């Protein structure tokens, strides 16, 4: 949430007299909201007035995630467990942004393993490369 400052706080931050800041507000050079008999200046408006970078609100930042399901056929229980453990270890480390989530489900009767991956696009792509390498490695054995 954007902080709001009183005219006195803005004057102190900028090293100006309170009357100077009020004059800027009355002249329209510094945007402010009148609440009762006092002005309040939004942090964004103060940053714009001083030329400081204006922070982008979190809601305005673009974010993308992928939900991916990988089905691996002809995989036995022991191999499925090894693959699942390797993938869990791969996502266990610290990461920037939102965490990468993974779920595995092995169907013994059908000999299939489903890997559900939820996370940011780049992290999901890296994990898919690991899945592909592990599948190819085990197919060559």
Image: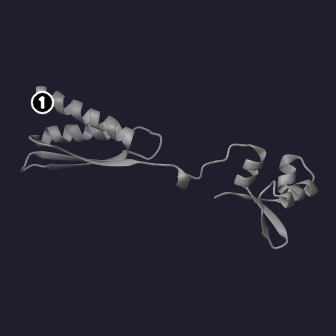
Work out which quarter of the rendered image holds the N terminus and state it: bottom right
Residue at horizontal 24 percent and vertical 41 percent from the top: 84
66 on left or right of 141: right
Residue at horizontal 79 percent and vertical 68 percent from the top: 34
Q: Pinpoint residue 23: horizontal percent, then vertical percent.
A: 89, 57
Q: Nearer the viewer, residue 79 or 135?
A: 135
Residue at horizontal 48 percent and vertical 49 percent from the top: 62
**Residue 141 in sight in this render:** no
Q: Nearer the viewer, residue 50 or 135?
A: 50
Task: Give the SS element for disc 1.
Answer: helix
What number of labels is visible? 1
Work out which quarter of the rendered image holds the C terminus and state it: top left
Q: Pinpoint residue 19: horizontal percent, then vertical percent.
A: 93, 57
Q: Residues within 10 Å of mark 1 (few under 14, many from 20)?
A: few
Above or below, comparing residue 49 to residue 41 in the picture: above
Q: Residue furthest top?
A: 140
30 on left or right of 114: right
Q: Residue furthest left?
A: 109
Q: Pinpoint residue 29: horizontal percent, then vertical percent.
A: 81, 54
In the figure, residue 79 lies in which quadrant? top left
Q: Pinpoint residue 68: horizontal percent, then vertical percent.
A: 27, 47
**Colour style of the rendered protein structure:** one colour
Q: Residue furthest bottom?
A: 36
Q: Nearer the viewer, residue 68 or 80?
A: 68
Residue at horizontal 31 percent and vertical 37 percent from the top: 127
Q: Which residue is mark 1?
A: 139
**Residue 18 in sight in this render:** yes
């Amino acid at each position: 949430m954007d902080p709001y400052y009183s005219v006195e706080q803005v004057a102190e931050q900028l090293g100006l007299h309170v009357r100077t800041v009020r004059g800027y507000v009355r002249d329209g050079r510094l945007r402010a909201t009148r609440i009762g008999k006092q002005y309040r200046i939004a942090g964004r408006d103060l940053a714009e007035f001083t030329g400081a970078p204006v922070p982008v609100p979190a809601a305005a930042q673009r974010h993308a995630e992928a939900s991916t399901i990988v089905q691996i056929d002809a995989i036995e229980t022991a191999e499925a467990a090894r693959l699942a453990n390797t993938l869990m270890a791969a996502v266990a480390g610290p990461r920037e942004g939102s965490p990468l989530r993974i779920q595995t489900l092995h169907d013994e009767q059908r000999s299939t393993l489903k890997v559900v991956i939820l996370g940011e696009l780049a992290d999901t792509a890296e994990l898919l490369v690991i899945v592909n390498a592990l599948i190819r490695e085990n197919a060559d054995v």
